[in-house]
Amino acid sequence: MTSNGPTPDRIMQLINGYWATGIVGAAASHSVFTHLECGADTAEDLAARAGISERGAQTVLDGLVSLGLVEVRAGRYANAADAAAFLVDGKPASLSSFARLKLGHAGMADLPDVVRKGGPLSDVVVEVKDNPHWKGVVTAIAAQSVPVAAIAAETLGLAGAGEISILDVGGGSGIYSAIWLRLNPAARSTQLDWRPINAIARELLADQGVADRFDCIDGDFHTTDFGTARYDVAVYSHIAHQEGPEDNVAIFAKLRGALKPGGTLVVNDYVVDDDRSGPPFALTFASEMLLKSKQGGTWRRADYHDWLTKAGFEDVSFQRTPSPATLIFAR
């Protein structure tokens, strides 16, 4: 290997990638990004505000600088722009609780055997209503949908759409309903999900002051009837990746039937390019589905177009977002 040849630096960073999860999770657990945002700009000051050791504060700051989440100038520390936007506690799109959640979600030791088998090693997968996985994850991942839901609302012109009805299938925390009902005071929304998850959504919608225009249907969306020509807009957000092709086609067909003439289905998910060359996050996320779902994966644009066409939609368009997710609009 010459001085101008490849080096092992990138490989070492990837092999030790779990350090990044630990550093960001530890920082979020001690509200490091929040304290930095409020003016703590040295390890000593951060340690005092966060109630942690100065050695620990310095180590976390060093790690965050290496990850590009914190910047240092003349010995003073500050959040990088993306950390300020997405890791400060209390901001609508904050992912700090998700970072804390991921501290307990290693599980990669099983991946070689899962790759060999082609699916989870046990029957404990994500698609069951009594999986304790949901209690923490539903609220933690809600922030990921905040900017995407706002983009979808702008694209559809929902704020000025008047008395529209919305169906959110597998709506989880209810974040789409919360955002859209706040934007449009004449709209009503119905969420279809398992009973314990709907309970979480009801709390969020009550906190947002729009619970009076929010209804829930407790059930499994694979078997529950969606109704016929009842809704102007339907949402299927971050569900397709845990379903196989046949189930996605079946659910899209039910959603098509539930929409009024001229209605729109909004799909939000990690969509990969047709040649599977990117985007990076969507390609990586496929491993999560291999570990935790029986048939799930990250699907190509061509897959979605094919499935939605089979389900009866005639106009399918894709919209990239600043997040790792892609919006799909089907009419």
Image (cartoon, rainbow, N blue to C red):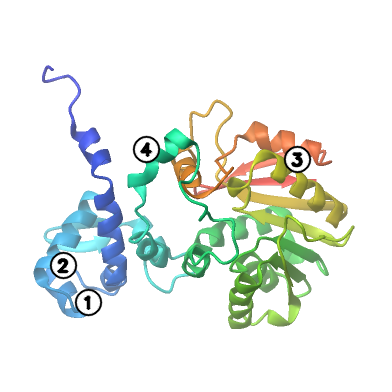
Does residue 292 appear to the left or right of 192 in the view shown?
Answer: left
Q: Disc 1 to disc 4, how far (Cα)? A: 39 Å
Q: Secondary structure at mark 3?
A: helix
- The numbered mark, 2 or 1, whose residue comes first in the sequence reads 1
- Label 4: state its secondary structure: helix
Taking depth in this image into account, of 169 and 109 the one nearest to the observer is 109
For marks 3 and 2, give the one nearer the viewer.
Answer: 3
N-terminal label among 3 and 2: 2
The reply to whether callout 2 and callout 1 are in contact (CB within 8 Å) is yes
Q: Which mark is residue 57?
A: 2
Q: Is residue 68 visible?
A: no
Amino acid bearing label 1: Ala
**Identity of the amino acid at label 3?**
Leu
Taking the spot 23% from the left edge, 44% from the top edge, the residue there is 16
Tell me whether circle 3 and circle 1 mark residues in contact (CB < 8 Å): no
Looking at the rendered structure, the number of numbered marks drawn on it comes to 4
Q: Residues within 10 Å of mark 3 (few under 14, many from 20)?
A: many
Q: Vertical placement of 146 versus 40: above or below?
A: above
Q: Position of residue 160 (x, y in %)?
A: 76, 65
| Callout 4 amino acid | Pro
Q: Residue tagged by mark 4?
A: 112
Tags 4 and 3 touching, CB below 8 Å = no
Query: Which residue is the site of mark 3?
Result: 308
State which mark lies toward you, 4 or 3. Answer: 4
